[in-house]
Amino acid sequence: MFLMTFVGEGLFEMDWLIEFGGVIVRVFMQPFIYLFVLLLMLSGYWRIKKDRQNFGTKVYPYFHEAKHTWSISIMVGLILSILAIAFGFVISIPFALLLGLVMLIVAIGNRFSWLSAGYSLAIVSAMMYFLNIYGENYLPSNWLHLLEATDLFYIPFIIGILLLTETWILAKLQHDDTYPELVKSSRGKYLGQHRIKKLTIIPFIALVPGGWIEPFAEWPLLEISGESFGVMILPYVFGFEYTVKSRLPRDAAKWLSKKVALLAILILLIAAGSYFVPFLTVVALVVAFLGKEFIQLVYRSSEERRTPYFRPAKKGLLVLGTLPDTPAVDLGLIPGERIVKVNEISVENEESFYQAVNQNRAFCKLSVKDLNGEIRFAQRALYEGEHHKLGILFVKETDSYVQETRLEKQES
């Protein structure tokens, strides 16, 4: 008897191992992977095209939107996988298709802000809710049955965890994680801004109803409480996007991270209460969508009211950004710092900056006013073939602004 039990347990464990091996293979059969790559390529193409228009060169390469996200996405995916298997979260194929449809629409519009879980999962949940009620006249009965397999009770918990992930990425934002841009003001002057834009893929494992798998493939199925399930990795495409005009990018990211964290905690608390009061699941989903929209509206309103941060100045040159692998990076320049002197020569525009750099093509010394308002010195040897402006991006000056500055200097 003991031997039979042992063999039976061994076969059960073998089924699990075979099934999890198949999970890795099946992940490349899902459209989410290719949608993720498509989004990255389209985003990179549009970004580089805009860079060439603004600065005459690309700033960051393709796929840069996913930089500094992989360790976080794998860790969050592992947490979600453990929770999904432990609590029996089931992904229905209609649910996955609806989620893919929402992401495809986002891809067409190039709006990463709608890839935040507060939007995408809340929208998909609303679609599922109404399809469960009114879908009898539009969907086959077997699809409705599969749609009901995904319990909406779990969705607010997933949204809360993913919003905490957004908080984590925002809080750890690096200086090279944002994208400098130029825009024209209503007065025709160029202003600088930064775009916080991230895209990653969070792979987490969940159960799939065996009834959907059996007609298409002979994959190993797991028997749980008398029902058969397969195991599938759902490569959830995760992203967010914010535009920063009136403050430093890292300051904006910290402000946003605190607000998103508060929203995530509120959603998780309401979701926990839905265990006792089921209707709170709907409340949690509504709070997720409206809360994310409220944060966006408050943030955008604040940005519009405040004075633009990156604009031409009368004294010194404000650093909008730096090109990778250029002297600017070695000199430690970051967005928001102001270059006052180059090789002991005061600079007020790009023309005087370029002339000062050419005073000594073998060495460069900068006097820089840092983010604390203190002067620091940065110096570096220069080599042939390096960027003629050291790889520093400034806010472009319009002809009228240059003429006004020259007139003011003559009058003084």
Image (cartoon, rainbow, N blue to C red):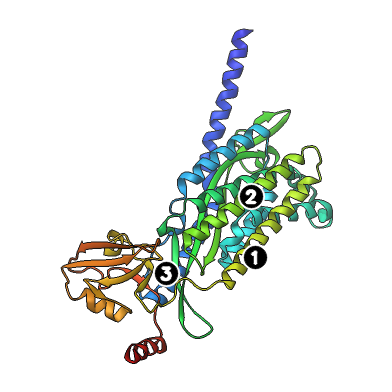
Residue to which mark 1 is pinned:
297
Q: Secondary structure at mark 1?
A: helix
Label number found at residue 344: none
Residue 272: percent from left, percent from top: 72, 39
CA gap between label 1 and label 2 equals: 16 Å
**Residue 94 relative to residue 393: left or right:** right
Residue at horizontal 23%, vertical 62%?
379
Residue to which mark 2 is pinned:
262
Disc 2 residue crowd, few under 14, some 14–19, many 20+, Cα 10 Å? some
> Quick check: marks 3 and 1 in contact, CB under 8 Å?
no
Residue to which mark 3 is pinned:
48
Q: Nearer the viewer, mark 3 or mark 1?
A: 1
Disc 3 residue crowd, few under 14, some 14–19, many 20+, Cα 10 Å? some
Residue 331: percent from left, percent from top: 28, 61
Disc 1 residue crowd, few under 14, some 14–19, many 20+, Cα 10 Å? few
First-in-chain label (1 vs 2)? 2
User: Is residue 110 visible from the viewing direction of this image?
Assistant: yes
Q: Decide which of 104, 2 is in the foreground and name it.
A: 104
Residue 151: percent from left, percent from top: 74, 42
Residue type of the residue flagged with mark 2: Leu
> Quick check: marks 2 and 3 in contact, CB under 8 Å?
no
Residue at horizontal 16%, vertical 72%?
360
Q: Residue furthest top?
A: 1
